[in-house]
Amino acid sequence: MGGMNPKIRTLPALILFSAAACAFFATACRPAEKPAPPADEAVYRLKPGAPGETAFSMDFSRLSKPTGIEEFKPLYHTPSVEQGNTSTCWSFATTSLFETEIKRLYGLEVKLSEMHTAYWEFVEKARRFIREKGNSDLREGSEPNAVILRMKQYGAVRESDYNGLVGGATAYDHEKLHGELWACLQGFKARNEWDEVKALAAVRAILDKHMGPPPETIEVEGRRLTPKEYLDQILKLPLDDYVAFISFKYLPFHTKGEYRVPDNWWHSQDYNNLPLDEFYGALTGALAKGFTVALAGDISEVGNYGPEDIAVIPSFDIPPDFINQDAREFRFANRTSTDDHVLHLIGTAERPDGRWFLLKDSWRTAWQGRFKGYFFYREDYVKLKMLTFLVHKDAVSDLMAKF
């Protein structure tokens, strides 16, 4: 009788055993994969401060988040202050940055006036409107580098010298002020009347009515100083040492150009453009070196929620691994990422679910949660939704060498 060779007959079994063994050892020796976080769930919830109204949101109950401010080991900063019903976040956040910088540079602790800068920003915005014969933006808001420009022109004063409140008011409200300014300047436009002296006198009368006139001199250590002298002789802020950054494809990277948003109403070209990885790395690097940052971007998102003190990107919007330059660019181009708000970045913390950031915040939503005047931003929110920042050049000297 004929039959198969025993060695040949056992070969398939040996092959199967070897394959199974390789698969076992490959799996056993591979590092354990990090379990995927549970998918975020969309919900509708009652709007804070709006009884009976609901808003699209997310379920925050399963979210791991920092337990408190101390977890971030925050850098020095002055206490949070509410901006009230105004669009002056740019002044509040950047003034806070400069207060921290004065402490870092000279050890001097001081509370500066945000409204002194805001007053003169209104004046300069009106001046450009008249000079451009109405072809200049009059909407509320501005950018961090506007504080540099106004301080160079008009100096600075302490909050105790000028707080911009009149008639016994204890909170800021610029609704009537803006309405009167708009009507005044639109009147000049309608009459084709471009007399700058006359227009600015009318504008300043409105500002003085709602904010009070800023002081011409202040007393400092027994001396009378102008606001400009106070800035130059006492504060000694090196205003030319602060640099602004953006991250957009409409400009070549590592070049300067315009930040194309309405609040850049004077069309500043002084923005340094970085790819996203360098933009984000500059923020973490600055904090690691002991520098704080004025950070601006979009806060009108379902994952940005005051009662929880946090800002995150829900996975039903975009999974974190898909956040990149193009995802960020897409949202800026279709205007779902807009230049809403400026905050003061003062700390960071590494957690199992990634890096979080501590923001000092002047907007009303920062007073809805446990940590009044603060917000916790997760790294996905910063990468996708924060659009520009201002920082001392020494914090980013390696990047500045590329420009």
Image (spheres, rainbow, N blue to C red):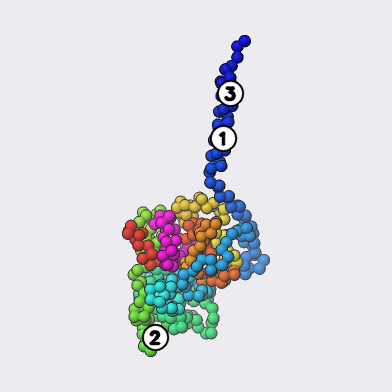
Relative depth, front residue between 384 and 75: 75
Report, in whole angstroms, how far the alpha carbon at label 2 lies from the one at label 3.
98 Å
As helix, strand or loop, the secondary structure at mark 2 comes to strand
Residue 286 rendering spot, x and y as whole percentages? 42, 64
As helix, strand or loop, the secondary structure at mark 3 comes to helix
Q: Which residue is mark 2?
A: 220
Residue in the image at 45% along x and 76% along y: 114
Could one spot residue 215 in this view of the protein?
Answer: yes
Q: Which mark is residue 21?
A: 1
Could one spot residue 228 in this view of the protein?
Answer: no
- Report the label total: 3
Q: Residues within 10 Å of mark 3 (few under 14, many from 20)?
A: few
Residue in the image at 57% along x and 27% along y: 14
The reply to whether callout 2 and callout 3 are in contact (CB within 8 Å) is no
Residue in the image at 41% along x and 78% along y: 108
Relative depth, front residue between 84 and 220: 220
The amino acid at mark 2 is Val
Please state the extent of the stretch shown in magenta in the rendering. 274-301
Does the magenta portion include 293? Answer: yes
Q: Is residue 128 above or below residue 333?
A: below
Between disc 2 and disc 3, the foreground one is 3
Does the magenta portion include 162? Answer: no
The amino acid at mark 3 is Thr
Residue in the image at 51% along x and 50% along y: 321
Give the residue furthest to the right: 52
Quadrant of the rendering where the C terminus is positioned: bottom left
The reply to whether callout 2 and callout 1 are in contact (CB within 8 Å) is no
Nearest to N terminus: mark 2 or mark 3? 3
Q: Which residue is mark 3?
A: 10
The amino acid at mark 1 is Ala
Residue 298 rendering spot, x and y as whole percentages? 50, 62
